[in-house]
């Protein structure tokens, strides 16, 4: 049992820290076992295996909060030295809270990938399917990843809470060419298990998307009504999630400060955190402070209902944590993040209805440069984009080499209709699930 | 660090079980990270990690394994799970003692300075930024120092050790005036120890960042459409990092995955362009003595007077392409397999004057600072977001405008470079790609592009 192994490892650390006058010791331990395989021309190309355990320890000394991280649990002297270094710069008061009890949530699948039936054959079949699409010149990447993560929270009283899950992900990236024209597309599919059918459907979808983009050209600059596809809206909202986090609000870095219970979006918009969302990436039962995650409404009928809190930010407002205390990485203290964030409306439309409602405009199907081109403080965004021109409610022709610019806070207010075609952000992003949306106007810059 | 006989045992095991190349990468890294927001210390975290990454090839198949538990019993357990079967009578040979070359002549190691001294310096800088203007509503600094030791050995006779010390601060200043809200960023860094703070006036850096944020308030909307662009010196070089740098990495070029695949010796840019990647510049943020495959870093001239002379090549992709490594293989940590990446990438200075570039433009924009960008190497589509941006009209810089994203295709834009200035500078940043987050330098003199698509808000 991992927790028994952990107690063997951390008990000496606890003893050494006590001897150095640290008290109230708590550990955050992350175990990650990962494996990925990719193919090229039907043969295995790259195979990567990772086996990692990382530790973060926090404790109090003279009433101050000290913490450090390490991955060599037997290097006792180094750990104590690092904690004493942390004490030198410590200013925050430390409040030790024992974990509520010992729980184990979730489970992991540690079977090696190559023992899974026919994984290389499935990848090869997916690669071959992509080439069947006319115009596909290169399958840049065709691979499969399995990650098993276990989070353990332990305190010096012997309690241990753990949250474990396994996520599998298949990813495909292709390049279509015709003469001098080039168009690329990529996508992924993920879940606890991925079926052969899902892999093959991904292959066909991505290769079709790439081939259909050939011939895309830039379009005239101007203001246009727009549909943001489900993938585009998910990616954009993901970039702006921090404006809903209490630390950003309290540090005066979010324009939503002071806007609780006020309308911040069109009345049709609902935004909820759903830890159990079926198509979400995240499978957590507790946050990184041991508090159970929960469903909550962040935007209801366009009104802002709550921010998201960890323990520290909740305490500043005499509130309870909303179970959103998550660590960005092993290095720093607990910050704020979501499990699965979902946007929807009570009366959704089909994508055909969105196009017909719009009549004339642009259907933005892809964006890039999000990490650079969004300003989360004032809401402005300017991103490279591609899509399809819509004329009389029908798809006319593809376009690319344009930017789409606007303001996120204004966009929320300008949502006129929402679709029913939900999709989740790709793996590696925070898990955000959105449908396509019709909005009043964006600025396109092209020729 | 690891003993020679342990490394030899790993390499021997791989070679005797079918590998035709094997490599061991071992790392010990100490980091200190500090984040201060206003008068609050949001994070102050020392820490240390060690780990091992083992790679081997068999033809064009590669395998990589990484773990923090570098003890012999664990490493061989993991190797045996992947490489079983009867061992052949093969050996990797005797390993020579490690070579170490100190490119990084630091004076004060980060660990020699008490954390309170670092906090004092940073708090003063943050306060200086906040005090610069009453419209500064929040000030933030993120500080990192890193002391990394790596040991790299392979079956081709390489055995090296390298010590990399890095220090960097990133200031963010937030300005509001009741109607608008803007932020500005600046992140100087170096391959230096704490002498970085003696050589750089970080309080003035914070004040200038604050001034930049305030200047953006009430900035006009940036124009939209295609127009001439002048990109400023220094970190403006990120433009070329995105427009063509990634597309010259062997990991992209192999098998036709880049718009510059198969174009060695061809003219791919204006004859004004000479593009260099050099990881051997002493003291620079993106520098390292040996790359992460143990090859000595060097000055690689990628484009010379518009002609494509070289790609950035790592060992694995070089094997596929039939090219030798260029000392360009990098990884964020032992958790990543190395691949071809940039170090300090810059456009060599030319002879044109910045003033003449501005004077030559009827209507366009001047990008003084760049935030960040990205590229699709297959199609050449790149983008970057501007920080301090100004409108040029009738040959004069007239007013600040709000930031915008500029886009283009690398192959087209490189041909459209009309003027290259004489005011070279190198800036510092991070690059995020397949082998993790890397410290990189990006530099250039001021450059004029005849025509680019500018994604402003004004139509």
Image (cartoon, helix red, strand yellow):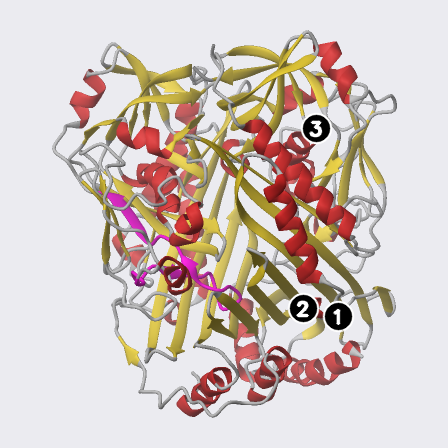
First in sequence: mark 1 vs mark 2 = 2
Q: Which residue is mark 2?
A: A33
Same chain under badges 3 and 1? The reply is yes
Same subunit, tags 1 and 2: yes
How far apart in space, not on screen, are marks 3 and 1 (Cα)?
47 Å
Span colored in magenta: B324-347
A41 horizontally vs A21: left or right: left
Q: Is residue B47 visible?
A: no
**Neighbourhood count class around disc 1 (C-alpha, 10 Å): few under 14, some 14–19, many 20 upward:** few
Q: CA distance from mark 3 to mark 2?
A: 43 Å
Q: Which residue is mark 3?
A: A258
One can see residue B107 in this view? yes
Closer to the chain start, of discs 3 and 2, is 2
Confirm whether circles 3 and 2 share one chain: yes
Nearer the viewer's eye, disc 3 or disc 2?
A: 2
Please report, as a chain letter, where disc 3 is located: A
Q: Which residue is painted at 33% across and 39% down in the image?
A: B240
Q: Chain of mark 1?
A: A
A80 vs A116: above or below = below
Residue B452 percent location from the top left of the image:
36, 23
Residue A377 appears at what percent x and percent y? 56, 31
Q: Tell which of B158 and B29 is nearer to you.
A: B158
Quadrant of res B91:
bottom left
Which element type, helix, strand or loop, lies under badge 3? loop
Where residue B1 sits in the image (x, y, percent)? 43, 83
Which numbered marker is on residue A110?
A: 1
Whether B327 is among the magenta residues is yes
State the SS at label 1: loop
Residue at the image position 56 percent from the left and 68 percent from the top? A87
């Amino acid at each position: 049992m991992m927790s028994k192994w952990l107690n063997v490892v951390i008990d000496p650390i606890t003893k050494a820290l006590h001897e150095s006058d640290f008290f109230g010791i708590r550990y955050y331990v992350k175990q990650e076992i990962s494996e990925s395989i990719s193919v090229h021309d039907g043969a295995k190309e790259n195979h990567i295996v990772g086996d990692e355990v990382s530790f973060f320890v926090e404790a109090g000394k003279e009433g101050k909060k000290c913490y450090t991280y390490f991955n060599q649990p037997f290097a006792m002297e180094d750990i104590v030295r690092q904690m004493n270094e942390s004490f030198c710069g410590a200013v925050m008061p430390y409040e030790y809270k024992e974990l509520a009890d010992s729980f184990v949530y979730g489970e992991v699948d540690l079977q090696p990938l190559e023992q899974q039936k026919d994984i290389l054959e499935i990848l090869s079949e997916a690669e071959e399917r992509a080439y069947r699409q006319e115009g596909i010149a290169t399958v840049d990447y065709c691979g499969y990843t399995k990650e098993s993560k276990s989070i353990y929270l332990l305190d010096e009283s012997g309690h241990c809470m753990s949250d474990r899950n396994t996520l599998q992900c298949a990813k495909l990236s292709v390049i279509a060419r015709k003469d001098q024209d080039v168009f690329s597309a990529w996508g992924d599919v993920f879940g606890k298990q991925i079926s052969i059918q899902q892999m093959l459907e991904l292959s066909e979808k991505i290769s079709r998307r790439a081939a259909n983009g050939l011939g895309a050209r830039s379009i005239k600059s101007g203001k246009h009504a727009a549909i943001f596809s489900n993938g585009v809206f998910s990616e954009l909202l993901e970039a702006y999630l921090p404006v809903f986090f209490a630390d950003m609000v309290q540090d005066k870095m979010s324009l939503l400060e002071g806007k609780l219970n006020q309308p911040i979006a069109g009345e049709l918009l609902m935004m909820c955190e759903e830890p159990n969302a079926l198509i979400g990436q995240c499978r957590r039962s507790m946050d990184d402070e041991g508090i159970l995650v929960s469903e909550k409404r962040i935007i209801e009928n366009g009104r802002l209902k709550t921010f998201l809190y960890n323990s520290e930010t909740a305490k500043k407002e005499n509130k309870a944590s909303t179970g959103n205390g998550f660590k960005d990485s092993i290095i720093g203290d607990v910050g704020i993040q979501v499990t699965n964030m979902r946007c929807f409306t009570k009366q959704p439309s089909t994508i055909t209805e969105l196009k017909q409602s719009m009549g004339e405009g642009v259907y933005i199907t892809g964006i890039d440069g999000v990490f650079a081109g969004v300003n989360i403080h004032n809401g402005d965004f300017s991103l490279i984009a591609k899509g399809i021109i819509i004329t009389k409610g029908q798809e006319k022709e593809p376009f690319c080499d344009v930017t789409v610019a606007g303001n996120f806070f204004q966009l929320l207010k300008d949502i006129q209709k929402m679709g029913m075609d939900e999709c989740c952000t790709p793996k590696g992003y925070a898990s955000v699930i959105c449908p396509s949306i019709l909005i009043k106007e964006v600025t396109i810059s092209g020729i | 660090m690891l003993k020679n006989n342990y490394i030899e045992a790993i390499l021997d095991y791989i070679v005797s079980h079918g590998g035709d190349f094997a490599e061991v990468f071992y790392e010990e890294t100490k980091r200190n990270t500090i984040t201060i927001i206003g008068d609050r210390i949001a994070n102050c975290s020392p820490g240390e990690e060690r780990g091992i990454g083992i790679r081997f090839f068999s033809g064009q198949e590669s395998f990589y394994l990484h773990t923090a538990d570098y003890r012999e019993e664990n490493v061989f357990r993991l190797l045996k799970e992947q490489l079983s079967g009867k061992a052949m009578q093969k050996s990797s040979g005797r390993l020579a003692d490690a070579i170490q070359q100190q490119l990084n002549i630091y004076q004060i190691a980060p660990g020699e300075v008490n954390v309170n001294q670092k906090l004092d310096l940073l708090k003063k800088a943050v306060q200086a930024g906040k005090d610069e203007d009453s419209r500064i509503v929040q000030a933030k600094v993120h500080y990192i120092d890193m002391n990394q030791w790596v040991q790299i050995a392979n079956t081709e006779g390489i055995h090296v050790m390298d010590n990399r010390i890095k220090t960097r601060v990133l200031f963010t200043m937030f300005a509001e005036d009741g109607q608008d809200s803007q932020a500005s960023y600046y992140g100087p860094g170096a391959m230096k120890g704490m002498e970085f703070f003696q050589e750089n006036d970080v309080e003035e850096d914070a004040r200038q960042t604050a001034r930049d944020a305030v200047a953006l308030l009430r900035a006009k909307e940036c124009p939209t459409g295609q127009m001439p662009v002048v990109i400023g010196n220094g970190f403006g070089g990120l433009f070329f990092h995105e427009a063509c740098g990634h597309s010259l990495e062997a990991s992209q070029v192999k098998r036709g995955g880049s718009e510059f695949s198969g174009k060695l010796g061809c003219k791919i840019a204006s004859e004004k362009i000479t593009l260099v990647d050099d990881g051997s510049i002493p003291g620079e943020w993106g520098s390292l003595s040996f790359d992460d495959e143990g090859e000595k870093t060097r000055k690689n001239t990628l484009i010379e007077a518009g002609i494509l002379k070289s790609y950035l090549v790592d060992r694995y992709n070089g094997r596929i392409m039939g090219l030798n490594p260029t000392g360009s293989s990098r990884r964020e940590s032992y958790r990543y397999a190395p691949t071809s990446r940039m170090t300090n990438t810059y456009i060599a200075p030319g002879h044109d004057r910045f003033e003449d570039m501005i004077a030559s433009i009827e209507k366009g924009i001047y990008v003084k600072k760049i935030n960040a960008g990205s590229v699709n190497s297959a199609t050449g589509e790149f983008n970057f977001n501007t920080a301090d941006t100004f409108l040029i009209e009738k040959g004069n810089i007239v007013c600040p405008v709000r930031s915008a994203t500029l886009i283009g295709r690398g192959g087209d834009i490189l041909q459209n470079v009309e003027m290259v200035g004489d005011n070279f500078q190198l800036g510092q940043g991070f690059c995020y790609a397949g082998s993790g987050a890397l410290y990189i330098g990006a530099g250039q003199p001021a450059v004029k592009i005849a025509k680019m698509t500018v994604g402003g808000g004004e139509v």
